[in-house]
Image (tube, grey):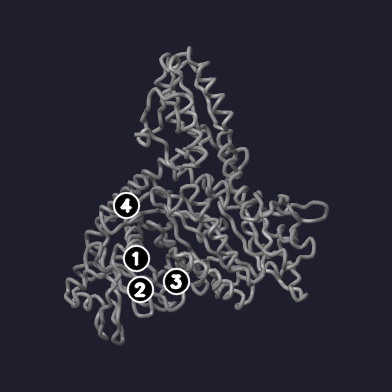
Amino acid sequence: MSASARASDPAQPVRVAAGTTAFDALRESGAELNGPLGAVVVRDQDGALRDLDWAPDADTDVAPVPAQSPDGLAVMRHSAAHVMAQAVQDLFPGTLLGIGPPIEDGFYYDFLPSRPFTPEDLAAIEKKMGEIIKANQRFARRPIDDDAARDELKGEKFKLELIDLRSSATGEEVTEVGAGGLTMYDNLDNKTGERVWTDLCRGPHLPSTRRIPAVKLMRSAAAYWRGSEKNEQLQRIYGTAWASRDDLKAYLNRLEEAAKRDHRKLGIELDLFSFPDELGSGLAVFHPKGGILRRELENYVRQRHMDEGFDFVSTPHISKDGLFYTSGHLPYYADTMFPPMELENAEYRLKAMNCPMHNLIYRSRGRSYRELPLRLFELGSVYRFEKSGVVHGLTRVRGLTMDDSHSYCTPEQAPGEIKKLLEFLLGLLRDFGLDDFYLELSTRDATSDKFIGSDEDWQSATKTLEDVAIASGLELVPDPGGAAYYGPKISVQARDAIGRTWQMSTVQLDFNQPARFELEYQAADGSRQQPVMIHSAKFGSVERFIGVLTEHYAGAFPAWLSPVQVIGIPISADQNEYLDGIAGQLRRRGIRVEVDASDDRMQKKIRTAQKSKVPFMLIAGSTDVDAGAVSFRYRDGSQRNAVPVAQAIEEIVDVVERRDNASPSAESHD
């Protein structure tokens, strides 16, 4: 293979001879080493990422990892976090270091400075980062034993704590310490080789700082050390880094578009919902227009469940906490449940999930195999004590409504029921205009003690879900360790109109709760058998789904969902009565319509309707009245004139009844 052909295929394996660095082997092979397609690290035969200056003890094949690949970007962002930390300590001597991992679309580093960072500080830090990047400092890995690391980092109390807990490090802490020996990463002067900065880190890293072509600091925020409010509060600086300046520019443009679509802003502008301080964090109230949106979603999902053979049930908002010990939610889920209430010599809890109560409904009488699958559905209000730092508009709340369903079936029925549920929820998402998605399979972490049940049950449940997911033909992405404590799950990850990914519907297979609640059915041979339980949420939560739809459509909901579907705009007050008559006809056909009879001029009424994102505007002047017609104006600004009233009504009703998700326009009638 020619060097040019090899360079065009970043995944092409390259043989690295014993004692030779990966960099030298890649260069000799003709692999690309610069630009977005250039390798920044390599992946060895065991799947581990290695620095380019890694030299194996024996001949081995490696795969180059390009800068623009997901793994390449993560390495680049991790290296950018180091550059930022170096810049901070250069500009603000005495600042202590926390951790600095890569995250989705960027990176952060936690610091303990003498004072909070200001916007001016961030500008200075970014400028200093540019100088470090231009200096082309080399990243060099240096193994170190525990005692030497403690001595070298004796002034960094957070790093010392990481060294002490490395065997139990979790989450983003593992970028610094974890299984195996400790390592430092030194930043070396490109000319003299002198160490100019160092950090405790597992790596890998870029070969040099100059391989960071595009970086920007985004914001600073307060953050508790190791994510616990019991610990010291630090300052966290967020940044982003990309494989090219064009990629960075595109990302910033996406952020700008996302800001325009922010459901929290649109919720206020469109008068949909609010979060009164008097209620507390994460508790929303829906205004009349938002209430219409909720009603449409809830009516739709309720009817769809009934069409799919589910029985509607209802359960209370509160229960004795013993129920949640039986289910296993306590103690595993305690941190996200509201504290107990002492009532009549018993402790009660606000429910954080509906499944334990559905189990009680199943257990309320004897069940036969002939009843299975038994499908229960509820629009149930649940309450979760999310930390204040993660509460975010409607997409992360403390009071939410779950469209929760639970299917109880025989083990033999489980694959078919999961397939049916997956088809159901994918069809539901498509009905709302979300049709770009992939599946994620969340499994347990065998080393964690947060999961209950036998290895055999977990393996069987995971295999069942995996087989159904693969058969769907959709992309399947693994999520190791992401399962619920009682069983694995499939989640649908949907991309919105600007390409962002949202976790939406879920299907979870549960062998554990039926055992804990001693659920049984009488089998055909007369024996007592334990059913399998399948949890499923289609919207996830009504609140979150509204938040996602608001951003997906930028507030311009499909006509069938719009709180106000039609607004009548008279050119003068003389046409008010005429439009009121048309509005009455539309209401009798189930259309939500208003007439703007204010004293505003017609053009201002049109601007108001467009700002409110109303899909249909019916404009009438004296000529229209004489002709029994209206002018159709759409929210994209297009217009059709002299449309007969009867035709206008039928066109509106047709669009709404067809649940057409496309925004109506005059162009569709050309």
Q: Secondary structure at mark 4?
A: strand
Which residue is label 1 attached to?
75
User: Which quarter of the rendered picture does the C terminus lie within?
Assistant: top left
Choose the circle earlier in sequence order: 3 or 1.
1
Rendered position, 394 above or below 502 = above
Which circle's residue, 4 or 3, is located before the other in the chain?
3
Q: CA distance from mark 4 to mark 3?
A: 27 Å
Q: Which residue is mark 2?
A: 49
Mark 1, Cα crowd under 10 Å, few <14 / some 14-19 / many 20+, is many
Question: Residue 404's x, y, as percent?
Answer: 63, 54
Which mark is on residue 216?
4
Q: Nearer the viewer, residue 635 or 111?
A: 635
Toward which corner of the image does residue 70 lie, by quadrant? bottom left
Which is more foreground, mark 4 or mark 3? 4
Which residue in the protein does label 3 denote? 177
Residue type, numbered disc 2: Leu
414, 525: nearer the viewer = 525
Q: Residues within 10 Å of mark 3 (few under 14, many from 20)?
A: many
Dots 2, 1 in contact, CB < 8 A = yes
Q: Secondary structure at mark 3?
A: loop
Judged from the image, the secondary structure of the residue bearing numbered disc 2 is: strand
